[in-house]
Every structure is written in C-alpha cells, then in structure tokens.
C-alpha cells in the first residue's frame, strides 16, 4: 500500500483540483474524477444494501463486489494501471446464472421496488449504469481497460438479478410495469 494518511484534511483541494494516486493533479470535475466518484458512490450504496439484507450468500457476493469496486477505483486513480481481473467478470456471469435460475421468466418490465433491500439494489444498479457511462465518457479521452467496462456492464445485470432474488426471498413480488398506470 502507498502512503498512509495521518491527517484527513490536506487543504490541497481547496482550489478545485485533486490528486490522483500517481501524484498527478486534475480538476475535481475531470472525467476521471467523475468516474472515480461514481464508482465510490456505487460502493457506498452497496454498503447500505449490505446493512439491509440478512441473506448470507448475497452478503458474500456483495462484499466481494465492494472489494472489486475498490480495485476499480485504484485503477482509475492510477492511469495506465490494470487491477480488475477478467475472471471476476466470468465469476459474476456464473453468479448471475445461479441466482437467475429459480426466478420466473421475465414477461414484463420491472419497476424498482418491492422489499426495501431490493429497492436499494435497484438504486445501486442505476448508479452502476451511471458509473459505466462515466467510464465510457472517460474512454474518449483516456485509456480505460476493456475489462473495467465489461465488469460494470455485468455488475448492473447482477444487481438487477440480486434485486429480484431479494424480493423472492422476502416473499415480495416484483413490481411490474403496466402500460396504463393504476388509477390514483
């Protein structure tokens, strides 16, 4: 591990720039910082989701994802560094298949909701999609690893299936979208 923080505030960012892991200073609204911040936001939401679910198999998956997202953050803060591993994407695909198998086939769109833990998972999924968009924006001006883009794409799928699984485990049905909204 690099340097340890002995003080939380440094005052070095008071003028609108921030330091990357390689020592480079960039604007706080730089595409790289936007991507990094959105990945951090996603990780925080997954932490909240972890506090809301008692399912140990889901907790194990989400905890691994938190560590992997931290690696992605490291990759983003150290331009040119590759930390994400392709086998993590493959492992997510296996988890997706396993979790999706007992769920009913989708015939309708699903609205975020149901059990609180499922609703939080849907929120994490939507932030994951934003993180993916931020990485694509960054990729137009800087090198971004292909595995990081695949990782976030697959993660949003996994979070969708986890949300459905959490609803099922809590005895809640998925909230199905209806073309004609219900009467109020």
Image (cartoon, rainbow, N blue to C red):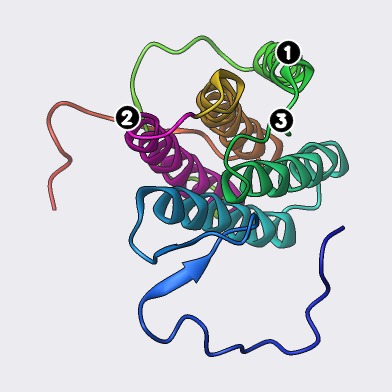
Give percent across and percent down for residue 37.
48, 58
Mark 1 is surrounded, within 10 Å at the Cα level, by few (under 14), some (14 to 19) or many (20 or more) other residues, namely few
Q: Nearer the viewer, residue 27 or 154?
A: 27
Pointer 1 residue: 90
Q: Nearer the viewer, residue 4 or 47?
A: 4
User: Which residue range is magenta in the image?
Assistant: 117-143
Is residue 127 toward the left or the right of residue 101 in the image?
left
The residue shown at (56%, 45%) is: 121
Q: In the rendering, which numbered label is found on residue 102? A: none
Task: State the quadrant of the N terminus.
Answer: bottom right
Pointer 2 residue: 140
C-alpha separation, residue under disc 2 versus residue under disc 3:
20 Å
The residue shown at (40%, 54%) is: 34
Q: Quadrant of residue 118?
A: top right
Q: Quadrant of residue 58?
A: top right
Pointer 3 residue: 84
């Amino acid at each position: 591990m690099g340097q340890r923080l002995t003080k939380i505030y440094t005052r070095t960012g008071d003028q609108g720039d921030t330091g990357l892991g390689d020592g480079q200073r960039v604007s706080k609204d730089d595409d790289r910082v936007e991507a990094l911040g959105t990945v951090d936001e996603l990780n925080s939401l997954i932490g909240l989701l972890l506090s809301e679910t008692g399912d140990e198999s889901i907790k194990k998956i989400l905890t691994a994802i938190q560590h992997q997202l931290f690696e992605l953050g490291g990759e983003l803060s150290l331009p040119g560094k590759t930390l994400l591993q392709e086998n993590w994407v493959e492992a997510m695909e296996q988890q997706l298949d396993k979790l999706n198998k007992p769920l009913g086939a989708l015939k309708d769109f699903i609205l975020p909701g149901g059990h609180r833990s499922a609703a939080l998972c849907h929120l994490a999924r939507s932030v994951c999609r934003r993180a993916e968009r931020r990485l694509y924006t960054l990729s137009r001006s800087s090198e971004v690893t292909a595995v990081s883009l695949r990782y976030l794409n697959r993660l949003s799928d996994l979070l969708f299936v986890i949300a459905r699984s959490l609803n099922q485990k809590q005895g809640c049905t998925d909230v199905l979208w209806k073309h004609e909204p219900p009467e109020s």
